Amino acid sequence: MSIEPNPSGGVPVEPAPAGAELDAPAQTPSSPQKGMFGITGTGDVSGFGGLVRPHPEVAGSPKPYGGYFDEVTDALEEAYPGFADAIEKVIVYRGELTLHIAPERIAEVAQIMRDDESLRFELLSSLSGVDYLASDPRRLHVCYELTSMTYRRRVRLESAIPAGGSLPSVTGVYPTADWQERETYDMFGVVFDGHPNLTRVLMPDDWEGHPQRKDYPLGGVPVEYKGAEIPPPDQRRVYQ
Amino acid sequence: MGIEEKLPSGILLTSVEKLSNWARKSSFWGATFGLACCAIEMMAAGGPHYDLGRWGMEVFRASPRQADLMIVAGRVSQKMAPVVRQIYDQMPEPRSVISMGVWASSGGMFNNYAIVQGVDHIVPVDIYLPGCPPRPEMLIDAILKMREKVMVAPLGPNGRKMLEARKAEGKMPIVAAGAMPSSYRADKTRRAEWTQAVKEGREEQLRIENWMKLQPHLREDA
């Protein structure tokens, strides 16, 4: 039941996971339900099809969170009246606090995190995107790593939007987010409303597609050796 | 190159050609095109230990208009490709390109959407230098081979006609300029050995045989 002309050697190929863009060039026939060991499935030997572990729905962590996490969440609750609507989940894992924020509130929350006296997260250390294809219907997440230099604390805010969605830009709060949001837009296609100049920053301006999404192919050309030609890594297959 | 059009062919032009090529090769001015880590090795080659000044190359001109050798040192991304081409176009003739390192020569380990799989997709390359990164000595070797190639470059249309004539008569040297490995070039006997092997068309075999002689587990007298 092959859906693409890609040589899978007659091995049955699973359909692409829900939400994958099937008109991407040279699609990777990866199935989220099969592991990469053994020929069952795609015969993909590169590992780019990916060993996919089951993703159970992550429940939030119970209070008390431990360390300074309680102070942070309490201060945020006090300072931000819409706390109950904005916070979707609080996760404490491996000593790191992650607050899942509703995407439309992220700019306000970031403002409070920066300005409130007891929070004072002045530094946006990093803004990046994550693609949770096949494990989250709201596929694209944006992670904001905030650092408080006054209190020496770190916290992460995470917002999830479906592909094609958008969320407010935090450039007004953290100017450093400018190019980082451009990079997230370039690589994942996350549109930031209110960004002063949302254009591609890493790829050429007229590039089509968003390369770091999970369904974007690796690209690459077959490499010619003496007496053999090896296909690019994501198209190497086991043939039986 | 206007004045060369007017020079007569023959002995006079040969001498002028040799003189002009010698001048060109003795003061190759590189255009700075360090893109990635090969740039560090290029800088090290220009530094005092692996001194490129020994061959007149201590100067790396930032302006391509004043450079005649572009060493593409590092991976070329899709976004950088038009820039590489523009710098190459801005270099005046005669110009040469050394593609330094595997990322520039073939895309290297980055066989993906973002990196041009070899800068020869964009500019014509004279010398490909493998390595990741190539040591400064390897870069110097590539530059020396480039100099050999420059030494036999024809001068103007008359020079090209003379080169064609020499090719037709079969008066070309047995080993092409820049084609002998430096480990063979350094020693007279090995040079003769290599030239003989090229005549017979078995230089690769010679290389393998000599390499096998050095391996303790492959020596027959072991």
Image (tube, coloured by chain):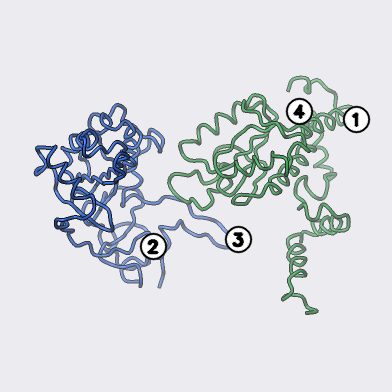
Chain colours: A blue, B green
B3 versus A118 height, above or below: above
Respond whether the residues carrying marks 2 and 1 are from the same subunit. Answer: no
Earlier sequence position, callout 3 versus callout 2: 2
Residue where numbered disc 3 is placed: A226
> How far apart are the two marked residues, 4 and 1, measured between alpha carbons?
15 Å
Quarter where residue B209 is shown: bottom right
Q: Which numbered circle lies on residue B76?
A: none
Q: Percent from the top left, x then y, of residue B112?
A: 44, 49
Q: Mark 4 and mark 1 in contact? Answer it, CB < 8 Å.
A: no
Which amino acid type is marked by label 4?
A: Pro
Please name the residue shown 51% across and 46% down the image: B117
Looking at the rendered structure, the number of numbered marks drawn on it comes to: 4
Check disc 2 and report its element: helix, strand or loop: loop
> How far apart are the two marked residues, 2 and 1, measured between alpha carbons?
64 Å
Q: Percent from the top left, x then y, of residue A58?
A: 18, 58
Q: For this rendering, which residue is in front, A50 or B49?
A: B49
Q: Nearer the observer, disc 3 or disc 4?
A: 3
Is residue A167 visible in the rendered image? The answer is: no
Residue where numbered disc 2 is placed: A47
Q: Mark 1 and mark 3 in contact? Answer it, CB < 8 Å.
A: no
> How far apart are the two marked residues, 1 and 3, measured between alpha carbons?
44 Å
Q: Mark 3 and mark 2 in contact? Answer it, CB < 8 Å.
A: no
Which amino acid type is marked by label 1?
A: Ile
Q: To which chain does the residue with label 1 belong?
A: B
Q: Mark 4 and mark 2 in contact? Answer it, CB < 8 Å.
A: no
Task: State left or right for residue A198 relative to residue B173.
Answer: left
